[in-house]
Image (tube, rainbow, N blue to C red):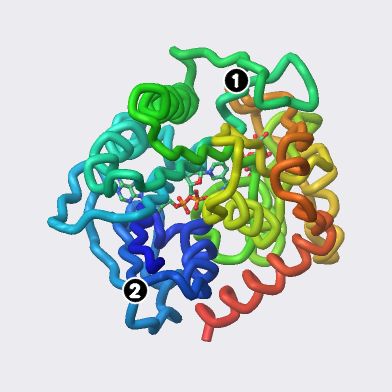
């Protein structure tokens, strides 16, 4: 059966990688990307020439179309703290408003996939975090627009599943890095790599003892692919997708710095309510997606990311 698919946020970092995989699907009849180019860029999809693909520059929360889709993948939202903190209301609208609006474009019996986040665990009090952990989140804190709009969108989708039997696939993605991150995105690994290649000074917020589980984009997008497009799957999520090797921010900065002799680390004030730790419990993912594993270590993933940014920076200087 051929399928029509809509991806919101497809010009972004994860979305553009997911599109490359979607276009390899033989059952794909049509792929529409809806993106307002807030944090995404046309560059990320400039290589796509497939006639099944089309781009609509529009807000996910107000996009309308006479067409209905078999599958909708809702990724529209900034993921970088500096970007979502700068425009918190717009972030809430992208997530919740986007889901409410896009649900109306789904065919009866269609599938709705959503990129939720490990941020819904807040500053976790248990480690690693299984999907059953309810999190430690401050609904009035500086990250609330992002965390709480992801939580509310999960609630919306699981209520739809209960009420109307909607086929819902929700993934809780842990920190992901790699090529096609914006130069001014602001997240840790891209910042450290760009800083090492330009100013030579890597900015670590606080003492750097806070930790994350850093997932290389190819591994993470493969996990999404396996969960989102398989018809026969008993569990409807939420599902943790990430790398479960937890490493401190300072260690990552030191590793990146070691790639560029002469670069150094500068400590800056800690970020308010910066989560102290984050690590996925992958028991469910391993059970549902046999053979899938986030296998790329940070050394290899950062080396690939480094090379990608090195080429981009060299190209902008020419
Ligand atoms: P990104 O900022 O690179 O991409 C987001 C895309 O959504 C951009 O192309 C942006 O222009 C678009 N967008 C934002 N608001 C929109 C709106 N209202 N209408 C249409 N388009 C809109 O971020 P990313 O890292 O690719 O993240 C993609 C999704 O995955 C997000 O929902 C994010 O919350 C989630 N996620 C990402 C990570 C990660 O580490 N990258 C971790 C957890 C969850
Ligand atoms: N971080 C840092 N320097 C930077 C960017 C980020 O020390 O230039 C820290 C940040 O304070 C956090 C961790 O790295 O503790 C991960 O930050 P990121 O923005 O990548 O993701 P998130 O905070 O959403 O996990």
Choose between 264 and 237: the one closer to the eye: 237
Q: Is residue 286 visible?
A: yes
Binning the other alpha carbons within 10 Å of mark 2 as few (below 14), some (14 to 19) or many (20 upward) gives some
Question: Would you name the residue on which mark 1 appears?
Answer: 273
Choose between 40 and 286: the one closer to the eye: 286
Cα separation, mark 2 vs mark 1, equals 41 Å
The count of marks equals: 2
Residue at 42 percent across and 37 percent down: it is 84
Give the secondary structure at mark 1. loop
On the picture, is 199 further left or further right than 17? right
Q: Nearer the viewer, mark 2 or mark 1?
A: 2
196 is higher (above) or lower (below) than 42: above
Residue 53 - label: 2
On the picture, is 66 further left or further right than 124? left
Q: Is residue 149 visible?
A: no
CB atoms of marks 2 and 1 within 8 Å: no
List x then y, in percent, for residue 227. Answer: 59, 49
List x then y, in percent, for residue 169. Answer: 50, 40
- Which quadrant would the N terminus be assigned to in this image? bottom left
């Amino acid at each position: 059966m051929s399928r029509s698919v809509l991806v919101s946020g497809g010009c972004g970092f994860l979305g553009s990688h997911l599109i490359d995989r979607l276009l390899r699907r033989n059952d794909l009849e049509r792929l529409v990307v809806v993106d307002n180019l807030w944090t995404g860029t046309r560059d990320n999809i400039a290589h796509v020439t497939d006639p099944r693909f089309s781009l609509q520059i529009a807000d996910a929360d107000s996009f309308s179309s006479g067409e209905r889709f078999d599958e909708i993948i809702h990724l529209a939202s900034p993921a970088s703290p500096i970007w979502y903190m700068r425009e918190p209301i717009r972030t809430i609208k992208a997530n919740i408003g986007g889901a409410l609006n896009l649900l109306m474009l789904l065919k009866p019996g269609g599938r709705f996939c959503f990129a939720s986040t490990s941020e819904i665990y807040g500053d976790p009090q248990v480690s690693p975090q299984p999907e059953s952990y309810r999190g430690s989140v401050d609904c009035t804190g500086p990250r609330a627009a992002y965390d709480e709009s992801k939580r509310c969108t999960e609630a919306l989708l699981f209520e739809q599943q209960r009420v109307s039997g909607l086929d819902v696939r929700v993934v809780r993605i842990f920190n992901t890095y790699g090529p096609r991150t914006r130069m001014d995105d602001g997240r840790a690994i891209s910042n450290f790599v760009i800083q090492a290649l330009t100013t030579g000074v890597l900015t670590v917020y606080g003492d750097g003892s806070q930790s994350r589980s850093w997932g290389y984009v190819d591994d993470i997008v493969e996990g999404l692919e396996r969960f989102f497009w398989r018809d026969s799957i008993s569990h409807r999520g939420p599902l943790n997708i990430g790398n479960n090797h937890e490493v401190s921010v300072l260690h990552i900065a030191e590793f990146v710095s070691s790639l560029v002799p002469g670069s150094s680390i500068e400590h800056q004030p800690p970020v308010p309510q910066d989560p102290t730790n984050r690590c996925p419990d992958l028991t469910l993912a391993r059970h549902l997606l046999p053979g899938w594993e986030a296998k790329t270590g940070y050394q290899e993933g950062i080396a690939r990311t480094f090379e990608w940014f090195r080429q981009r920076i060299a190209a902008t200087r020419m």
